[in-house]
Each structure stands twice: as structure tokens, then as C-alpha cells.
Amino acid sequence: MVGIIVISESRACVEMLKTVQTIVGKKATTGIVPLVIKSNFTKRTLTSKINQIIKKIHADEGVLIMNEIYGSTQSNVCLDFLHADQVEMLCGYNLPILLKAATLHDHAALGDLVTQLQVTGKKYIQGFK
């Protein structure tokens, strides 16, 4: 199983995971942890929280950190945790990505999971005229 941390600066990560649980069930989201960044978090606080969650959910297949946008404070803090084949990061997530993550993280390898989630994210962004 790949452990997953979903980070947001609002309750979006919590609410999106609730939606995922409604669709695929709570069991599918075991090992997926939301982290809401509060306005009073310092870089040290955020680093500590991420470190605690990684230790809590670290699985045989590693940990995937999802955050809202590349270049944000949360993204920059997460860069310190990256370790090939152990901790990877995906910047930018949506509901289809979280649904796919919930259905794959218990049996996919970390690198394969990241690749599949990137494809899923792109696939479900559509423009209409």
C-alpha cells in the first residue's frame, strides 16, 4: 500500500476525501490522510506535521504527498521530504485523481501510482464551447 497525504490551505482536502468515501467507501481511503494548513502554521510546524503523518502512514510501497499547486509554501516544504522510491509528490489534484488514488493505492507501486494519477488528472479536464 502507498500512504497518501492530501494537503490544502482550506478544508478542500477533507471535503474531497469525504466525497471519495461516499463513492468508494471508507475502507478504500485507509492510509489517505488530509492535512489542512492553518494560517498560523510556521514552516517548522508544517514540516513537523508532514513528518508525523509520513511516519504514521509509511507503507511498504512508500508515501505520496499531494498538494494544491507547485511553487506554493506547502509544495516547497514537501520538497525536503522527497526521496526516490520512498516519498514522491504530485502538485495539483482534483476529485478524479483522488478517486483513482483510493482505488489503486493499496496495490500499485509508488511510481506507477503517480504516473496513473497524472494521466487521470489530465484525462478528466475537459473544455467545452
Image (cartoon, rainbow, N blue to C red):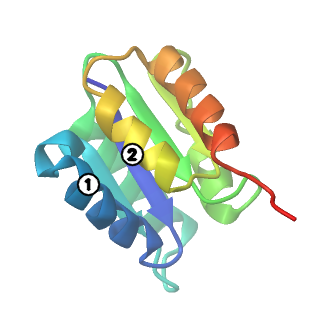
Question: Can residue 5 be seen at all in this image of the molecule?
Answer: yes
**Quadrant of the rendering where the N terminus is positioned:** top left
Q: How many neighbours does mark 2 have within 10 angstroms: few (below 14), some (14-19), or many (20 or more)?
A: many
Question: Can residue 56 be seen at all in this image of the molecule?
Answer: no
Numbered circle sitting on residue 99: 2
User: CB under 8 Å between callouts 1 and 2?
Assistant: yes
Which residue is nearer to you in this view: 128 or 84?
A: 128
Which residue is nearer to you in this view: 117 or 90?
A: 117
Label located before the other in sequence (1 or 2): 1
* Residue at (57, 52) in percent of width and height: 93
**Quadrant of the rendering where the C terminus is positioned:** bottom right
Residue 71: image location, x then y, percent: 77, 56
* Residue at (49, 76) in percent of width and height: 41
Q: Residue extending furthest right? A: 129
Under mark 2, the amino acid is: Leu
Q: How many neighbours does mark 1 have within 10 angstroms: few (below 14), some (14-19), or many (20 or more)?
A: few
- Quadrant in which residue 118 is drawn: top right
Q: Is residue 12 left or right of residue 122?
A: left
- Quadrant in which residue 60 is drawn: top left
Look at the numbered disc 1 and give the secondary structure of its residue.
helix
Q: Is residue 125 left or right of residue 101?
A: right
Numbered circle sitting on residue 106: none
Numbered circle sitting on residue 23: 1
Residue 96: image location, x then y, percent: 49, 48
Q: Is residue 73 left or right of residue 14?
A: right
Q: Height in image: 93 above or below 46?
A: above
* Residue at (46, 80) in percent of width and height: 38
* Residue at (39, 31) in percent of width and height: 63
Look at the numbered disc 2 and give the secondary structure of its residue.
helix
Residue 59: image location, x then y, percent: 25, 25
Marks 1 and 2, how far apart at CA: 8 Å
Under mark 1, the amino acid is: Ile
